[in-house]
């Protein structure tokens, strides 16, 4: 069996792998996590390649609206890392890796200040403090933001910094396979989206920062890039995936018109004082507050209004927050239930109203929302309520990593951002992703650079393995007959929306697994025609493998978690099971297919555990 080790492949490979690039560290993904990882690895003096499916600057992070959570204590001086840590653990129903939640809470303020040093400019108070807004599940006003375009500012800043560090960037290039040598990472195979030609990267370490999996569902806030590539690449390379049952459904996506169904309506609308009502005008969120948390929320409309007025004026208040700022899973279930019980809006959602605020303030603080509704739905949100409903938004599960270094369970493989797991447990608090990206992107970049320095040379890559992968990738062109990949995608999304959505039962999950098995057979025989130049149908033929794999991991993990916790709601198991509060579900590849089993959580040190005792009893 031949190997590709030291010599370039140019001209030797009949199947089109004509480009070969060598790097100490290959970062896959140029969102917040990937860019931050690449900057850090580069600062360590190693050679870094950065690969992304879209154009640089267009990664999903650019869509982030509401803000980045960090206990800067600029608005609420009582805030500190301990409270942020506690909020994150409570939001995650204590399934988070305690060490990740601790590092995140402690380091997020420095990462925000660093972004400012690198040129980001967050909204400020008149006396120059960083303005921080309230978000669900955060005790204090904690989200630094740039209007409702925070992700854009972050990406712009990180991209500028990265480009000036001298990164090698490969745009519109999709990685389809990781290669191992002696059990450790040795390279990655990719194709150019524009030409369809193959690219081989030889590398000592890979950082996966490929984002989430939302395209497995029909109604989603996620972009076309979210096909679970990183999770699938890691799984196929032998890494562990954990917490895959925890898919976050954001409560407020657009429900109308059909072409934009699922598009996000930022939680910033509720943070700025937006109110949810049903078709009878009832402000229904009070009905759905969990008893253990009711004391944290305003009791009356008057108290909620006083809280909003104080928040807008940046003044302290003894009023408690409005019920709309309950956690995302709770608000999603509330809207879903209102609609199901016949109290929905004409297009099957709830009303979200911010028109009681001055129009000038709405347009200044929520400019994207104002334009989004005016241009896409002909609704002026300064005068009319929005119609909103739950949308698949964020994947808490992903690659299991070491909290300090981002190392996955395969030597040389690292992961960060939405592709990684552990930080958010059973549910993520809004704003905690952008901070996660920069905190753990930096650590994964450093971890990968350090690892690569310890490896003397690039490992050999099996030529036969590479050729087999290229052949499999080109197979849809060779078939004389076969289904259109888009038909399989629609069937998959329908299956996931219907059987693995907000509310789950054993019967539905088992039905989903049967359907997924038959979809896998259909996906293996899809056919495409035409040239390899910018051929999204061909790209999808491969994406289906990843989407089916993550869907199976979600359904299998959800089946095993016979309880309701965080974002995972089992109608047939409505309560929490304390025994399941001590384990993560973990999916691994075996010779007999996917195996999912419970693995114990890391024990929290006594000093941190002591912060929670009374609270933990309440949440089970
Ligand atoms: C509409 C919206 C608003 C949000 N608002 C907020 C917010 O206000 N605050 C907050 O904290 N979180 C927010 N989130 C969540 C947050 O934006 C994401 O979780 C986060 O941006 C993910 O960043 P990432 O770096 O992990 O991945 P991404 O930014 O998605 O980057 C993934 C990168 O991987 C590349 N990639 C993927 N697969 C491959 C492959 N096979 N080969 C090569 N490259 C690949 C992509 O091209 C891309 O460059 C929001 C999410 C959405 C959808």
Image: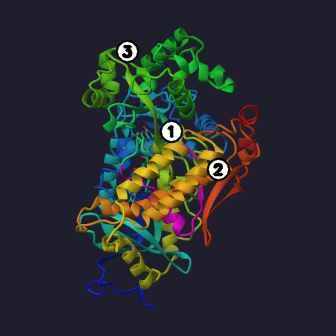
Instruction: Say if disc 2 is inside 8 Å of ligand 1.
Output: no
Residue sitting at x 61%, y 23%: 289
Q: Nearer the viewer, residue 16 or 539?
A: 539
Mark 1 vs mark 3: which is more N-terminal?
1
Mark 3 vs mark 2: which is more N-terminal?
3
Q: Position of residue 285 (x, y in %)?
A: 55, 21
Residue sitting at x 48%, y 72%: 452
Would residue 364 be found to the left or right of residue 326 on screen?
Answer: left
Q: Which residues are magenta?
A: 224-247
Q: Is residue 33 magenta?
A: no
How packed is label 3: few (under 14 Cα within 10 Å), some, or many (20 or more)? Answer: some
Location of residue 50 by image quarter = bottom left
Q: Which mark is residue 182?
A: none
Q: Which mark is residue 249?
A: 1
Q: Position of residue 379 (x, y in %)?
A: 29, 23
Mark 1 vs mark 2: which is more N-terminal?
1
Provide the residue designation for mark 3. Answer: 357
| Outermost residue toward the bottom in this view | 1
Residue sitting at x 58%, y 57%: 404
Q: Nearer the viewer, residue 126 or 156?
A: 156
**Up-down relation of residue 190 to residue 583 (above or below):** below
Q: Position of residue 130 (x, y in %)?
A: 42, 31
For the residues labelled 3 and 2, the Cα–Cα distance comes to 44 Å
Identify the image quadrant of the C terminus. top right
Q: Is residue 231 visible?
A: no
User: Foreground mark, 1 or 3?
Assistant: 1
Q: Position of residue 47 (x, y in %)?
A: 38, 70
For the residues labelled 1 and 3, the Cα–Cα distance comes to 27 Å
């Amino acid at each position: 069996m031949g190997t590709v080790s030291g010599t370039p492949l140019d001209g030797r490979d009949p199947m089109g792998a004509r480009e070969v690039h060598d790097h100490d560290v290959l970062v896959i993904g140029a969102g917040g996590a990937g860019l931050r990882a690449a900057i850090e690895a580069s600062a360590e003096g190693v050679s870094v390649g950065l690969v992304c499916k879209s154009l640089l600057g267009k990664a999903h992070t650019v869509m982030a609206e509401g803000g980045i959570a960090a206990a800067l204590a600029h608005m609420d001086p009582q805030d500190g890392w301990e409270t942020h840590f506690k909020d994150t653990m409570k939001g995650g129903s204590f399934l988070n890796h305690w060490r990740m939640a601790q590092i995140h809470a402690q380091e997020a303020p420095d990462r925000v200040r660093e972004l400012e040093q690198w040129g980001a400019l967050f909204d400020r108070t008149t006396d120059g403090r960083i303005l921080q807004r309230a978000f669900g599940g955060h005790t204090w006003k904690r989200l630094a933001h740039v209007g409702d375009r925070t992700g854009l500012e972050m990406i712009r800043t990180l991209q500028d910094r990265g480009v000036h560090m001298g990164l090698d960037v490969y745009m519109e290039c999709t990685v389809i396979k990781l290669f191992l040598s002696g059990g450790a990472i040795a390279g990655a195979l990719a194709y150019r989206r524009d030409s369809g030609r193959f690219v081989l990267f030889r590398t000592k370490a890979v950082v996966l920062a490929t984002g989430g999996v939302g395209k497995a569902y029909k109604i989603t806030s996620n972009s076309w890039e979210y096909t679970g590539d990183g999770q699938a690449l890691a799984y196929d390379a032998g890494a562990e995936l954990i917490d895959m049952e925890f898919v976050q459904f954001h409560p407020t996506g657009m429900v109308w018109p059909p072409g934009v169904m699922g598009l996000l309506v930022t939680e910033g609308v509720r943070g700025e004082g937006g109110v949810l009502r049903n078709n009878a005008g009832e402000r229904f969120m009070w009905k759905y507050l969990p008893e253990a948390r009711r004391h944290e929320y305003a009791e009356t409309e008057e108290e909620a209004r006083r809280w909003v007025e104080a928040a807008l004026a940046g003044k302290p208040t003894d009023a408690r927050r409005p019920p709309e700022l309950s956690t995302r899973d709770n608000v999603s279930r509330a809207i879903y239930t209102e609609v199901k019980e016949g109290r929905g809006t004409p297009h099957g959602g709830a009303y979200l109203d911010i028109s009681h605020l001055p129009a000038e303030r709405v347009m200044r603080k929520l400019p994207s929302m104002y334009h989004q509704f005016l241009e896409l739905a002909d609704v002026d949100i300064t005068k009319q309520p929005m119609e909103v409903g739950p949308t698949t938004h964020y994947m808490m599960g992903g690659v299991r990593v070491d909290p300090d270094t981002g190392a996955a369970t395969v030597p040389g493989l690292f992961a960060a951002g939405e592709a990684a797991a552990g930080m958010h447990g059973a549910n993520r608090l809004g704003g905690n992703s952008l901070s996660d990206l920069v905190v753990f992107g930096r650590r994964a970049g450093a971890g990968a650079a350090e690892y690569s320095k310890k490896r003397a040379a690039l490992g050999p890559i099996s030529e036969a393995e590479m050729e087999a992968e290229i052949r499999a990738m080109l197979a849809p062109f060779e078939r004389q007959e076969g289904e259109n990949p888009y038909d399989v995608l629609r069937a998959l999304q329908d299956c996931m929306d219907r059987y693995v959505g907000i509310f789950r039962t054993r019967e539905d999950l088992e039905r989903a697994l049967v359907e997924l098995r038959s979809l896998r057979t259909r996906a293996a025989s899809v056919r495409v025609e035409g040239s390899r130049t910018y051929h999204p149908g061909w790209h999808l033929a491969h994406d289906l493998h990843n989407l089916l794999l993550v869907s199976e991991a979600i359904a299998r993990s959800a089946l095993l978690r016979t309880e309701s916790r965080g974002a995972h709601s089992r109608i047939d198991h409505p309560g929490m099971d304390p025994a399941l509060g001590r384990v993560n579900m973990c999916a691994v590849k075996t010779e007999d297919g996917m195996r999912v089993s419970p693995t114990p959580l890391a024990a929290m040190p006594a000093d941190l555990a002591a912060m929670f005792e009374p609270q933990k009893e309440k949440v089970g």
